[in-house]
């Protein structure tokens, strides 16, 4: 990562450059203007020494030129410095606009940054955009998985209950146990979703306890018993 200087440091350097440039320009410009005015006969050294309290027209020329050129130098350096700060901010605004319009892959271009503050801002923004894109993709995958997991037990429950109404299945204890297993599966799925939300909100507290794995396996076998039978699997 490139090393960048802070905004305050860059402002201090820019103002120092402006001050030094205008000062040196004033000295050299004054030397050449007064030297030329003396050689051209506009003024003399004796007249400058006698009338030092009054502005001569050469003084006005020198002063006006210094003010004009100093303003031009300040504008050029100021525009250059402003461009260094505004350009990455525009990149940031464009990326934020694209994200608000649904393009979560948009990132702010951080290849032309000239200050530590803006560099950190761009880095944090791109990290936030990356996490947002990842969260949305994970949410889409979870939604698809949840829809699939809900569809299976609901389809079984609907088919068995419809079979009971149509007289295909006999409403006995075995059927009720099978339907109960499907309902318990839905309850576990809801509990898993609640656990997932707690994990995402960093509020999950784990409680360890002994379980009978045989009961869990038998419940799973009961849930998929119809598929096993259809596939001739034991």
Image: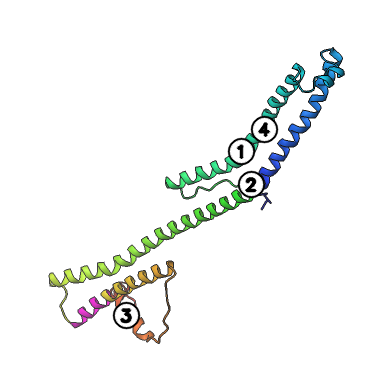
Q: Nearer the viewer, residue 162 or 201?
A: 201
Q: Nearer the viewer, mark 1 or mark 4?
A: 4
Q: Where the C terminus falls, by quadrant? A: bottom left
> Which tag, 4 or 2, sits closer to the chain's start?
2
Q: Are marks 2 and 3 in contact (CB under 8 Å)?
A: no
The residue drawn where x is 43% and y is 70% is: 199
Residue drawn at point x = 46 percent, y = 50 percent: 104
Residue 89: x and y in percent read: 55, 43
Figure colour scheme: rainbow
Work out whether mark 1 precedes mark 2 in sequence or the reverse, and give the earlier one: 2
| Above or below 128: residue 184 | below
Mark 3 and mark 4 lie on one chain; the one further toward the N terminus is 4
Q: Which residue is mark 3?
A: 219
Taking the image as shown, residue 223 lies to the left or right of residue 203, namely left
**What residue did someone put label 4 on?**
74
Q: Magenta residues, as a range? A: 173-182
Label 1 with label 2: CB-CB less than 8 Å: no
Q: CA distance from mark 1 to mark 4?
A: 12 Å
Q: Is residue 40 above or below residue 201?
A: above
Check disc 2 and report the residue beneath it: 7
Q: Earlier in the sequence, mark 1 or mark 4?
A: 4
Looking at the image, which residue is at 12% across and 72% down?
167
Pick whichever of labels 3 and 1 is earlier in the sequence: 1
Q: Which of the 4 quarters of the picture holds residue 212?
A: bottom left
Nearer mark to the viewer, of 3 and 1: 1
Look at mark 1 in the image and give the residue it sits on: 82
In front here: 188 or 121? Answer: 121
In terms of secondary structure, where does tag 4 sit? helix
Compared to residue 201, the image places residue 104 above or below, namely above
Quarter location, residue 180? bottom left
What is the x, y in percent for residue 121? 56, 51
Front label number (3 vs 4)? 4
């Amino acid at each position: 990562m490139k090393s960048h200087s802070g905004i305050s440091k860059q402002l201090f350097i820019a103002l120092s450059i402006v001050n030094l440039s205008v000062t040196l320009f004033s000295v050299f410009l004054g030397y050449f203007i007064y030297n030329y005015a003396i050689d051209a006969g506009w003024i003399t050294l004796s007249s400058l020494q006698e009338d030092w309290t009054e502005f001569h027209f050469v003084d006005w020329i020198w002063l006006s030129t210094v003010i004009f050129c100093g303003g031009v130098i300040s504008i050029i350096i100021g525009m250059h410095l402003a461009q260094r700060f505004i350009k990455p901010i525009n990149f940031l605004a464009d990326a934020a606009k694209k994200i608000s319009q649904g393009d979560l892959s948009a990132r702010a271009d951080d290849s032309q940054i000239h200050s530590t503050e803006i560099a950190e801002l761009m880095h944090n923004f791109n990290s936030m955009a990356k996490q947002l894109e990842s969260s949305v993709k994970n949410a889409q995958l979870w939604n698809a998985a949840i829809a699939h997991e809900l569809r299976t037990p609901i389809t079984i429950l609907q088919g068995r209950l419809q079979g009971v109404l149509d007289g295909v299945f006999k409403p006995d204890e075995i059927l009720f146990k099978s339907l109960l297993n499907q309902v318990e599966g839905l309850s576990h799925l809801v509990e898993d979703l609640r656990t997932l939300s707690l994990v995402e909100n960093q509020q999950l507290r784990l409680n360890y306890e002994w379980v009978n794995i045989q009961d869990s396996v038998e419940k799973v076998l009961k849930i998929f018993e119809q598929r096993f039978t259809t596939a001739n699997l034991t």
